[in-house]
Image (tube, coloured by chain):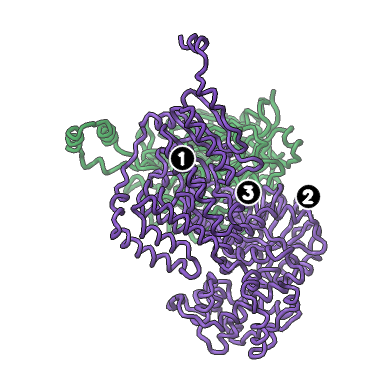
Chain colours: A purple, B green
Amino acid sequence: MTDVLDTIIPDDPAEDAATPPEAENWRLEKAGDTLTLWLDLKDTGTNVISEAVLRELDALVAHVEAVQPKTLVLRSAKPGGFAAGADIDGFSGLEREAAEEMLTEGHRVLDRLEALPMTTVAVIHGATLGGGFELALACDYRIGIEGVKTGFPEVQLGLHPGLGGTFRLPALIDPVEAMQMMLTGKSAHDRKAKKLGIVDDLVPDRHVDAAVEAAARGKVDRDTNLRAGAMRTGVARSIAASRMRSETEKQAPKADYPAPHALIDLWADHGGDRNAMQKGEIASFARLLETETARNLIRVFFLRRKLKEGGKGDDGIDHVHVIGAGAMGAEIAAWSAMQGKRVTLEDVALEPLGAAVKRASKIYQKKHLSGIDARDALDRMMPDPSGLGRSRADLVIEAVPEKPELKEKIYAGLKGKLKPGAILASNTSSLKLSDLVDGVSAPTRFAGLHFFNPVSQMPLVEVVSHDRADKKVLDRLAAFVAGIDRLPARVTDYPGFLVNRVLAPYLMEAMALLDEGKSKEEIDRAALAFGMPMGPVTLADQVGLDICLEVAKSMRRDLDRPVADTPDWLAEKVDKGETGKKAGKGLYDYDSDEPPETGEADTEIADRLILPMCDAAVECLRNGVAPDADTIDGAVIFGTGWAPFRGGPLTYARTRGDVPKVLSSLADTHGPRFQPDAGWSDFG
Amino acid sequence: MSRPVYIVDGARTPFLRARGKPGPFTPVDLAVQAGRPLLTRQPFERSAFDLVILGCVNVISDEMNPARVAALRLGMGEEQVAFTVQINCGSGMQSIDTAYRYIREGSHEMILAGGTEALSHAPLVLRQSATEWFGGMAQAKSPLDKAQKLTEIRPDFFSPVVGLERGLTDPITTLNMGQTAEVLAHRFGIDRATADAYAVESHKRLAAAQEAGTLDGEVVPAFDRDGGAHGSDDGVRPDSSIEKLAKLSPAFEKPYGKVTPGNSSQITDGASWLILASETAVEAHGLEPIAEIKDSEWAALDPSIMGLGPVLSATPLAQRHGLSVDDIDLWELNEAFAAQVLSCLAAWQDDDFCRDVLGYDEAFGRIDRARLNVDGGAISLGHPVGTSGNRIVLHLANAMKAGNHRRGIATECIGGGLGGAMLLEAA
């Protein structure tokens, strides 16, 4: 009957007029009464919300207004997720006014989407972050596909949400929870997102159509947002806000990290008033974009991407054999297994292997692996006291104590045992590869793979070359590093390589300061106030005073410049077994001492700790230890946690301007170790 | 078709004594712990197997068909066919026998056959009346129905039955396994001192084998999540003595019984795997067999004397192959109870028994203790029921190879009145 009607009645002219607009980043699909807009960015595997995406969406929404489907669905065609965020490249360099203009336009498009009369449903999966999350929030319903991850990571870029997130999320869910998400950047996964009310339903992929239909018929349950009502009064908000302020100050002091504080102010002032929030959000975002912090943190984002891109390609590594089940070996093994590699972990004794399994199990708990995933990762990581994995592995990582004779012995034992084409990598941090390479059977397939402690928290891994290393092998190692979700930095066989070369003066100067009678708390406080994640005294304990001693020794031996003296009492402490946190006692006593708190800091101490690191970075740049300044800043930040909002030691030096001058004057008072490097003259 | 079948390798976990609470490993955990190093040391990929067969008696509810769960967790691939077999204490040998027959007949080339058991995880079982009450409670819809149901709770609902104890009781004769050993001890005149002396020797032999490294490679260490590294069988008591054992009270028939905890097998957790291969597979992968499986046999008898299972199952092997007692260089006879092992030996030396039951003209003969359970047995290292049958075949193969022996028999008694036996020859 209807078929006949269709043929005898000409098409509605209105529909004729509404031919869908051209779009490069969206695909349109019609099925019955439902119109689906598939977000599918051109020439990339990851969706981001760019100016073009919003402009095309504007035209598509106009089309939707004309054709009036019963239901509009927004989905992503990318397997990885809905959208990873806003297009940071698009706004990173913008001046305040240009940013305001762009944001205002974006808000207009999302408001238009929100105002559509039909039911709008965002079907979200995988990463649904930042601008992508804000797009989903402008729809009536959100259907999450299992594994969905929603959140606002903007604060990590020195910003807060800028496309309506600051008022749409608090209107949807408990406003205090919403603020927590935006202030901390922590995402809500899966059932957490459902529990918070971010997604109206959470279903496996195969039930998406049914869930969309249920939403279209209004059959999806939704709790009323009671807290939103309670927080409509300024008094309630101001009480909540003052608590947020003090919490935030502890984690991210306002002077260094203005964004979360700006967000709290915005919410406290206008929380009940959508229009005022919208205006305030745009203004505040544009203002933050101009801050030094945001510029540096956005740069850190780009540095991360750049390092990651250095590990493109296939590693051809399924099985990793780690020799040495100390803290580093165990962490490398546990992390690789968690990332899907088959791992064998060799040690001569059973006890450290048992301890390694326990450590792995703890890491998996900390990383919130499900029971099944943790079990599978533990199954993949086989303690291997008899070295069965040697002949099966595609990559052998040697992580034994830093004794050249021991390493030579291990390498000799590997001769003729490895699988053809297997790579041998050393996790050495203080020995030169050029000395070790003579002991290996295939020098072209030997390189350094320097992980940082603890591997599960430090994203950087140095891929260390030497004269005889094959470039293809280094490429594979970098790909391996990226494949296990770490960041590869390619460096040369320099004393301490890159990161430890830069970090060494931080630790060594702290010893000199202690020797002069400065208190450990005072020293740590100065570094913390600068923005370092850990004071040098605490860090020395963490690294191990025995290791620090070794590092100092090798710096003195291998560097062609004066370095700080190592006080005698340090060696004595090590002899007594007071080697740091692992021993329960080092420079701090871990039974009785309180960790230092942030507070008033001595700037001369800070300069003495920080500027030699800038100097070492310039020295590394001059000597080509890393390919460029970006790699140096990125590696130091991701390898040590170096004050990220300051952009890295080279960027900091460039911003500050007077570093060589201050170094010279420190050299006059404290000795030639502060003499600025020759590279400063070329450093602009 | 009848093709030769080889044992090419095998490994087991240390056997870990149950210590009054669930041990660190489930049955499949144990199978994975034993399987990982075994598979890693092979020259072929894990996906090269045609089949995985695993014996297990007490399967836990999270691991139905433990063979398949183990195969997947061992990374043997989604396409790996795997099934679980159960013939009580013979399960670990049943898996070998099934694999042996498949390969012999030509349908399979290489099979991973094992046994696993975590007796420390044996569940508490609700009484039938309690189970029914829970079922009714789940169906009660209205609050009134539920309240009504609550009044029906009885105190004994909360005193569950230990599943292990039930499992070790014969369902036909209601005799406990230890009691069946008492029956045999009585029938064959085994006294307490002889049984205790046998047990002491079992501990001494295992301790010596551990000390000498005889078990290296056969026993692979197991590692638990709490950092425990388990390197060797932990039930062994090198300082065991006849005086110490004499102090123990009878475990099953107080006060006159002869079977004590000291001269019985221990309750333990453990897993064991063997790799069985055809000639084709041996050649294809360049493997070195450790032994050849020549024949196997299962026998059944009165459940109350199940301990004679080895005599009833091993004798037909000797008869079929025309072997006298001297032709068999090594024996692994599972030590369920010292009195039971000694009864088997006595039966073979008993003219009447051998004539009436086994069809010989006179006694089969005396099995020299020097050829029997040379490196200890279940009394010193424990008896994870689904695993033991696998372990004795594995150890027999290794011991034959180490001592350059030509022929050996592994055999076991099986609760419920069965016996299993396997004849191996040097490869």
Mark 2 vs 1: CB contact within 8 A: no
SS class of the residue under badge 3? Answer: strand
Q: Which residue is mark 1?
A: A112
- Mark 3 residue crowding within 10 angstroms, few (<14) / some (14–19) / many (20+): many
Residue type at numbered disc 3: Arg
Counting residues from the start of the chain, the first of labels 2 and 3 encountered is 3
Marks 3/1: CA distance? 51 Å
Residue type at numbered disc 2: Pro
Number of dots carrying numbers: 3
Q: Which residue is mark 3?
A: A342
Residue type at numbered disc 1: Arg
Is A23 or B262 nearer to us in this picture?
Answer: A23
Q: Which residue is mark 2?
A: A420
Is B60 or A62 nearer to us in this picture?
Answer: A62
Residue drawn at point x = 71 percent, y = 84 percent: A562
Residue A65 is situated, as x and y percent measured from the top left of the image, at: 47, 32
SS class of the residue under badge 1? Answer: helix
- Using the image, name the chain to which the residue with label 2 belongs: A
- Mark 1 residue crowding within 10 angstroms, few (<14) / some (14–19) / many (20+): some
SS class of the residue under badge 2? Answer: loop
Residue A58 placement, left or right of A239: right
- Using the image, name the chain to which the residue with label 1 belongs: A
Residue drawn at point x = 66 percent, y = 26 percent: B107
Tell me the quarter of the image containing the C terminus of chain A. Answer: bottom right
The answer to whether marks 2 and 3 sit on the same chain is: yes
Counting residues from the start of the chain, the first of labels 2 and 1 encountered is 1
- Using the image, name the chain to which the residue with label 3 belongs: A
